[in-house]
Image (tube, rainbow, N blue to C red):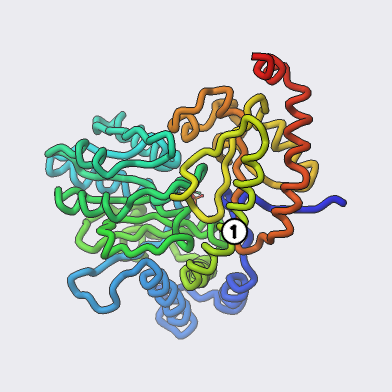
Amino acid sequence: MKRFVYADNAATTRISPQVLDAMMPWLTDGYGNASSIYRKGREARIAMEEARHKIERALGVPESRPDFPVEVYFTSGGSEADNWAIKGVAHLMAQQGKKHIITTVFEHHAVLHTCAALEKEGFDVTYLPVSDKGLIDPAQVEQAIRPDTALVSVMYANNEIGTIQPIPEIGAICKQHGVLFHTDAVQAVGNLPIQVAEQNIDLLSLSGHKLHAQKGIGVLYCRKGIKLPNLIDGGAQERGHRAGTENIAAIVGLGAAVEAACADIAGRAARLSAMRDRLIAAIGQIPRVHLNGDAVRRLPGNVNFSFEGVEGESLLLMLDALGICASSGSACTSGSLDPSHVLLGIGLPHEVAHGSLRLTFSDENTMEEIDYILDVLPGVIERLRAMSPLWERMSKA
Ligand SMILES: *Cc1c(COP(=O)(O)O)cnc(C)c1O
């Protein structure tokens, strides 16, 4: 029986019915420009500001703390938020002679390539190595801080191996040393409790399409007082920092998605980790497999294995033929033959990194789907290994 199982929710998610419902009025009758003063415009502005408040609340912005004013800027997604946060802080702090940035080797390319661009401009970037379990030690961050350090950027949870970083500890260290702290929380929002104030997070990126909102919408949260340079010059939208008529439907949908995701973090963790742990236990029975990333400090919906003697692309194609959507490395690296920088970062040899499989789940998945994956996966691995000259050599060794 052919089935369809979408197990690539770290790449993107389906728009949920409740998000679509929230968006629909703003795609039809609610077409007013949020800058217009008549009712149709004012209604759009009110809807947008409500979405902004929902996001502030979900991120743990204190309701009534005048000492913690914040800005939530709508962006075109996680990549734009990462670019703006890092380039913005870099250019801001360069005016004070601070031109050093600390990040890690296993960030998303939106962070890594932004840092590489800054290096070309003369900034100095330290890329912290990650442990074989996929974790950063806060002490590494502290040791790397210099008098000219402008920014630390460490992702909240990794998109490939799902490992969760010690963000509150890193935030405390940055605060103590007077260094700004950015975290790419695209994979974390709705999966982990985020408290920007308590966790000393100065800047945070999130993206709609990873949590059942639309593609092309995201947020850069920024503690007020950080005078980020404008991203887009033009009209007065987003307090003049990012001009352009706002996409109200996408913004309202994002507000609904973030609110829904953050209202049930514990429930989602329980449901998804049951699926994850069942897969991890069963796949672990296959000979010569490695779980990538720490088994405990990992996102509830993330499973990532390497199968020795298996080629990742072939594995994905065979699973696709069985109706299973999965990924090997990240969506951004598939299409190239280089193994994932994350898997190389945790120390996997090239051949092993090539044979990796990432399965990521959301509220739309069921235990029945996990059963189906477990029904077919061992046979697929066996067939691929039977065809592999590499496996033949390895299994004799
Ligand atoms: C998907 C993702 C991004 C990019 O977000 P877009 O909205 O697709 O630009 C950035 N960082 C992480 C960790 C991601 O998973």
Residue drawn where x is 29% and y is 59% of the image: 222
Residue depicted at x 15% and y 37%: 146
Q: Is residue 307 above or below residue 79?
A: above
Q: Is residue 71 left or right of residue 106?
A: left
- The residue sitting at 34% across, 60% down in the picture is 221
Q: Is residue 90 above or below residue 19?
A: above
In this orientation, does residue 248 appear? no
Percent from the top left, x then y, of residue 389?
72, 16
Q: How many marks?
A: 1
Give 290 or 38, whichever is nearer the viewer.
290
Position of 368 with respect to 246 (left or right) is right
The answer to which image quadrant residue 69 occupies is: bottom left
Q: Whole-percent x and y of residue 376? A: 77, 43
Question: Secondary structure beneath disc 1?
Answer: helix
**Disc 1 residue type?**
Ala
Residue underneath mark 1: 274
- Residue at (38%, 74%) from the top-left corner? 53
Few, some or many residues within 10 Å of mark 1 (<14, 14–19, 20+):
some
**Residue 248 placement, left or right of 126:** right
Instruction: Answer above or below: position of 181 versus 270.
Output: above
Q: Can see residue 43?
A: yes
The one of 88 and 386 positioned closer to us in this rendering: 386
Name the quadrant of the C terminus.
Answer: top right
Observer-nearest of 39 and 389: 389
